[in-house]
Amino acid sequence: MRRRVVQSTLAVVVVALALLGVPLAVAGVVTASAMEQRDVDRVASTVGAAVERRLESGEPVTVSVLDRLPEDAYAVVRVNGVVAVQQGEPQSRPVQAEFQSATTSVYVEQSGIALLATQIRVVLLVLIASVVAVAAAVVLGVFQARRFAEPLDDLAARARRLGAGDTRGSFPRYEIAEVDEVARALDTSAGRVASMLAAERQFAADASHQLRTPLTALSMRLEEILASDDQQAVREEAAIALGQVERLSGVVDDLLAASRESRSGSAVPVEVDEVLTQQLAEWAPAFGAAERPVRLEGQRRLRAVTSPGGLAQVVATLLENSLMHGAGRTTVSTRLMGVWVVVEVTDEGPGVPPELGSRVFERAVSGTSSTGLGLALARDLAEADGGRLELVRQRPPVFALFLGVAPGPADVAAAAPVAAGAGASPASRRARPVEGARRRPPQPAAAPRGQATGERSASGASSGATAGKTQRR
């Protein structure tokens, strides 16, 4: 960056010198020549006037009329065509002038060496000024480069510490608007990272505390089962152990729900259009390389409660999934459904195989050779912000992301399709509700788990055993 700042400053100065310095030098040379010519014209006129006065008074014309000429000048005075006075020798490359009257002719030459010297001095002055300007530009460029680069270096070092988990302190301000804006954004990120780290540490501490006693009891129960030879006693102990496992699972669910609630504090009102437009701009080159159009349509100016990073990651996962496994045109549409903002991603590909269905959100489940983690992580991110990610139709595939509506103005307008590839639809087209979306309304991520936990808490040992067997399947 330092080199670029210095180079840009030098480029500006060089251009300015080319536009101003060269014309200035030319103007100086021309001006010096004009001044020298004016001086010679004045000398010739003065000599001619002196000769005229002598002729009028009847005095002889002598060499004294040439007293005002420089010693190295050449002059010839003619009266009625006859040379009356002559001084010096003809000059090489002279500056010449001539005075004419009815009876008198005066011809004067001065050496051009003095004029050339003056012109050279003018050009040298312009060159010296140019060199001084370039040197000043270098000094100013280095100063500006250091002024701009030092805050960025400081921000980079602090950002590296933030990446290493050091969230202490805030980023300083540098009185440079753009750099200060980056510092404010990093301060916000540092606060979120600190909150997330605190939540993770709290989760680890809670998990360690809450799971230690049930695990100890379960271990003792299993030891009793191993030590017993009575089948009836073994079955009873196993049923009790299964109940303990079920209660342990409930504890884990409660901890996860509490952790999710703490993470959902990072959700803020987000302009959905901005995130979607940014994601389509990032993915447009990849879709263009695959010769597949991708577009955005639906209602505009929708605001949802989510985290900008989480929404961007979910949409990026769905676009990547469509690019890798889909075909034809990919459409990202937005609409308002009750208290939910719905973001749908669909394409014209073969869709999800019937044998997979909703299992596409399970980890390590994939219809191809991919890892099968993308959609699972995307659903986790959606649920962490209080939303839901669903496969609402298998063929052609339609993935719907449900997000809570953020409070704000309710005016929404029909969106003109934003084409990132060939084949964009006309601006008047609106996104239609996807078939099946209303039959599967989104549910808060923690609600089913809380219900299941309550049912498990109210059930006896036998129901716990049945639930445990079902869970293992």
Image (cartoon, rainbow, N blue to C red):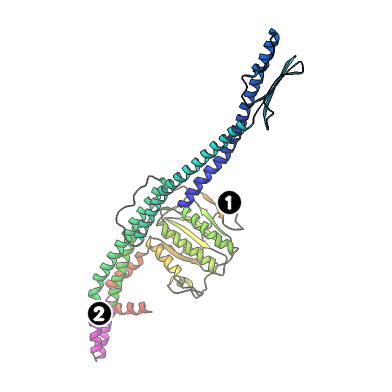
Task: Judge whether residue 257 is colored magenta.
Answer: no
Query: Which residue, as the protein is rendered here, is positioned at the far right?
Result: 81
Task: Judge whether residue 233 is colored magenta.
Answer: yes
Mark 2 packing: few (<14 Cα in 10 Å), some, or many (20+)?
some
**Mark closer to the observer (2, 1):** 2
What secondary structure is the stretch in magenta mostly built from? helix
Instruction: Please give the label number shown on residue 428.
Output: 1
Rendered view: 35 above or below 437: above
From the viewer's perspective, tell me whether residue 47 is left or right of residue 121: right
Q: Is residue 437 visible?
A: no
Relative image position of residue 397 (x, y in whole percent): 53, 66
Which quarter of the rendered picture does the C terminus lie within? bottom left
Going by the numbered disc 2, the residue's amino acid type is: Leu
**Front residue (pair 91, 250):** 91
From the viewer's perspective, tell me whether residue 248 is left or right of residue 399: left
Secondary structure under badge 1? loop
Instruction: Please report the residue visible at 62 percent of the width from the left and 31 percent of the height from the top.
Output: 30
Instruction: Please report the residue visible at 76 percent of the width from the left and 15 percent of the height from the top.
Output: 80
Secondary structure under badge 2? helix
Going by the numbered disc 1, the residue's amino acid type is: Ser
Q: Is residue 326 visible?
A: yes
**Residue 102, quarter of picture:** top right
Rendered view: 36 above or below 312: above
Relative image position of residue 400 (x, y in whole percent): 47, 62
Instruction: Please give the label number shown on residue 218.
Output: 2
> Which residues, given as a range, are shown in magenta?
219-244
Rendered view: 242 above or below 432: below
**Front residue (pair 156, 307):** 156
Label count reads: 2
